[in-house]
Amino acid sequence: MSETLQTSVLIVGGAGAGLASSIFLTELGIDTHLIERRETTSPAPKAHYLNLRSMEIFRSLGLADEIYERSTPAENMATVGWYTSLAGDGELDGKTIHIMDAFGGGALAEHYGESSPCRTANFAQLHVEPFLYAHAEKRISKREVASSLHFGHELVSFFENELGVLATIRNTANDETYTVQAKYMLACDGGRFVGPSLNIPMQGIERLIDMKTAYFRADLSSFIDDDSPMIRWFSNPESGGAWGSGVMVALGPKDFGRNSQEWLMHFAFNPDQIENVEHEELAEQIKSLLRVTAETKVEIIKTNEWQVKGVLADRFRQGSVFLLGDAAHCHPPTTGLGLNSAIQDAHNMAWKLAAVIKGEASDSLLDTYESERRQVTGKNVRWALYTFQNHLLIDGGIGLIPGAPVEMNTQAYRNLFEDSEIGDTLRHRAKLVIDTQTAEFQAINMEIGFKYQLGALHKDGHESTEREMFERRYYPCTDPGARFPHFWLNNNGKNLSSLDLITIDSFTLFVEKNVEQWSALVGRSPLANKCHVVAIGAGAAQMKPLNDDWNQFKYIGDNGAVLVRPDGHVMWRSKDASGMARFIDELSGFFKS
């Protein structure tokens, strides 16, 4: 065994949470040692949706434009649709059941555009992980931080000592082991090893259903006449509805819409069936479901089996070890909250960890990672379970009866498409029921409207009206714990988003008047040299809002201030400077002068 390596942070796992953690911590000048048991990044599509908040985070690091260039154009992810099949010449083949605006497309575009400087993205995890890996390497090289990425390396054992965590790691290529002494360890291993080793239970539904994902290549262009859907759900009498029939996602990667070269298809299977489906059989099943011609070539690139679960770890921290991503919470795929929650876990964790490692904050700041993220991701898990199970409701809205003979369900579809008064009634019912799935595809309030209730923030007792989780609109506010809202500003002739003024390495104090007074107060606080003051208003030296949005939701009046953390969440606000002294005392519980 070689000499023990020293690092500030050992990152266990090289998927979304791990690679994002490496990027964020490197950006903050913190050295890390990342290990991943696989030889390469994921070859399977897995998650593919990057929501508004994740894209805002990537934008803050200058990565969003490259993602947009390489991922699905907005016009090719504007809707989702429900169909009996893609093609075919049978009486019920190739029929559209319903089309829904989704992901900020169609009628949603104006509201999404007002709410964020970003749009959502469809970028499969098999592309996301290499993208993050490449940028992690670039940042390590650029900043000359003593960080490193080690794929084909697995964690063998670990224990806490007075210096943090001492870990034994095995190189899977040559079976050699070495030890790493880290101040802290981030478990981004999907819950495979670290959490169970610490006896941290996962509470919730461990196995809701078994799924198989087929990642395949096919030319389906001649069977598609609408390029707007990113996701197509299939429902027919023979295959059944919801997850039993299949759901297909276009993946590009060069052309999109009908010309997409690669696709994924999710299927639900009974546990005793899932391992016995061969590639050839699965390819034929896809062709049968889509009703494409016999000559259509379906090439299975890869499959993976997985279990739908909705679980949350009892705790996210144990000593010097923190759980992130799937190690802390596992979601059904609906609403796309899994990968996005993992990226946002890393974003929340990084600035706090950096402040403690640099000696700027006390260890108690790290406790707020659990109090903040466990509350939000717990809600995300419940929401994803709801939206996954709600697809079964859609079956009833269409007229399917579980377990009924094919003949009976066939008649239900005939009735649905019948040109008659009853047909109109059934289609109206189907639309009403399917529209409840806006909870999955129009979930802007889940994406950017969440608030931390406890943690590194000061509640002022004047929160905005609490919105229902089902809300399809985002209502901007400056409540402590909320994401600071986006609004457009003009700075010396250049337009920029309010979010562009927030950086991962400092706090931001937004004020309108008394700039010198506020700057002096900050200078006497534990945040001195860690906070910059931004003046908004009509003054010559101020950034000018392009519209009245800021006045509508700022709450602080003309003499107040809003303090925003490095992760973009409001930490404190006040209508005047009188409360600053008390808040400075509170800050001393976390930050050192």
Image (cartoon, helix red, strand yellow):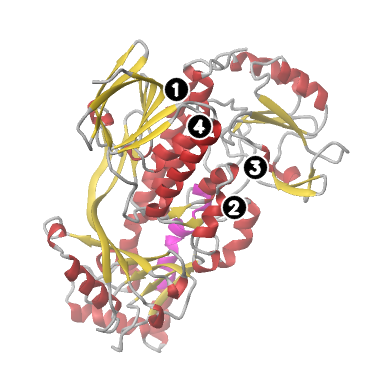
Marks 2 and 3, how far apart at CA: 10 Å
Which one is in front, 467 or 549? Answer: 549
- In the rendered image, which residue does mark 4 sit on? 26
Secondary structure under the numbered disc 3 in the rendered image: helix
Instruction: Name which residue type carries label 2.
Output: Cys
Marks 1 and 3, how far apart at CA: 26 Å
**Residue 468 visible somewhere in the drawing:** no
Left or right: 172 with respect to 150?
A: left
Instruction: Name which residue type carries label 3.
Output: Leu
Marks 2 and 4, how far apart at CA: 24 Å
- Residue 76 is situated, as x and y percent measured from the top left of the image, at 50, 68
Which dot, 1 or 3, sits closer to the camera? Answer: 3
Which dot, 4 or 1, sits closer to the camera? Answer: 4
- Please tell me in which quadrant of the rendered image residue 421 appears: bottom left
Which dot, 3 or 4, sits closer to the camera? Answer: 4
Q: Residues within 10 Å of mark 2 (few under 14, many from 20)?
A: many
Tags 4 and 1 in contact by the CB under 8 Å rule? no
Marks 4 and 1, how far apart at CA: 22 Å
Which dot, 2 or 1, sits closer to the camera? Answer: 2
Q: Residue at x 37, y 13 (%)?
A: 163
Which circle marks residue 118 in the picture?
2
Instruction: Name which residue type carries label 1.
Output: Asp
Which circle marks residue 367 in the picture?
1
Mostly what secondary structure, the magenta segment? helix
**Residue 206 visible somewhere in the drawing:** yes
Marks 2 and 1, how far apart at CA: 31 Å
Which circle marks residue 499 in the picture?
3
